[in-house]
């Protein structure tokens, strides 16, 4: 195992993207903002349940079907189909968290390869990064739609390693979700937990290799010496 991983793998939903505006979309269709968090947690629960039982389904399909059930008894300001579409379309309008742009550029300057890996579609990641002017910094946008299972199943992370042409130990996953950190660690990846909100990491999950509060901290930890950064960049 090298001292520094060659590939940084980013989760997308909530790690790169700020999903808080989705609650506004719920309000716009006549639903309470609080339903957004309940809906997303239920979406993940059912995706994980499918994976645990050996199955899989697209994020958008699960999300739309659960959303339909969540909104069915709400006094909506528009038709149910239109309301579901309005909320789901919100994924392609989200912005990056404020710490992401500088952190991405610093990691790229350190000579590291950058990819995304999402339980959602690559199209959402493409839209997010293109609108932020960062698409060119990433060599690949990976999705579990091309993997055997959703994260946090081991085979999902093994797929990501194969797609990048490296061993799992040469990948470092950045995520805000402890379940993602645990799954990656169990598959042999190194990990960085992005804890923006001062949460407590669950003791029953494998601890992350790094805990950071903003993405820029990771580049400093992986390449703290500016001379090292310059050397890696020159050889890239």
Image (spheres, helix red, strand yellow):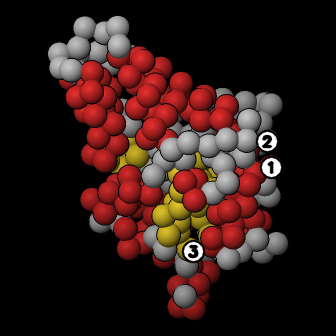
Q: Which residue is mark 2?
A: 206
In the rendered image, the quadrant that contains the N terminus is: bottom right
* Position of 96 relative to 32 (above/below): below
Q: CA distance from mark 3 to mark 2?
A: 25 Å
x and y, in percent, of residue 43 in the image: 52, 30
Instruction: Give the residue at x 42% y 72%.
Output: 137
* Element on which disc 2 rests: loop
Q: Which residue is mark 3?
A: 112
Instruction: Give the residue at x 73% y 61%.
Output: 158
Instruction: Please name which of the two marks, 1 or 3, marks the residue nearer to the observer.
Output: 1
* Element on which disc 1 rests: helix
Inspect this view and state whether residue 42 appears.
yes
Numbered mark located on residue 118 in the image: none
User: Are circles 1 and 3 on residues that touch, CB within 8 Å?
Assistant: no
Which is more toward the observer, 100 or 151? 151
Q: Which residue is mark 1?
A: 186
């Amino acid at each position: 195992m090298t001292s520094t991983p060659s590939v940084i793998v980013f989760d997308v939903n909530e790690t790169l993207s700020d999903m808080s505006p989705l609650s506004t979309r719920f309000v716009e269709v006549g639903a309470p903002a609080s339903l957004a968090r309940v809906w997303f947690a239920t979406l993940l629960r059912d995706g994980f349940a499918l994976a645990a039982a050996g199955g899989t389904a697209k994020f958008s399909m699960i999300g739309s079907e659960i959303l339909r059930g969540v909104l069915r008894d709400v006094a909506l300001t528009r038709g149910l189909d239109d309301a579901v579409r309005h909320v789901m379309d919100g994924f392609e309008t989200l912005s990056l968290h404020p710490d992401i742009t500088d952190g991405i550029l610093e990691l790229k300057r350190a000579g590291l390869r950058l990819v995304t890996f999402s339980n959602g579609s690559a199209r959402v990641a493409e839209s997010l990064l293109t609108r932020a002017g960062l698409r060119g910094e990433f060599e690949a946008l990976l999705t579990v739609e091309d993997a055997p299972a959703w994260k946090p199943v081991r085979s999902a992370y093994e797929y990501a390693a194969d797609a990048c042409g490296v061993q799992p130990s040469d990948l470092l996953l950045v995520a805000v979700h402890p379940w993602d950190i645990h799954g990656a660690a169990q598959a042999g990846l190194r990990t960085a937990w992005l804890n923006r909100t001062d949460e407590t990491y669950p003791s029953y999950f494998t601890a992350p290799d790094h805990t950071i509060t903003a993405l820029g901290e990771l580049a400093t930890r992986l390449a703290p010496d500016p001379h090292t950064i310059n050397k890696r960049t020159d050889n890239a």
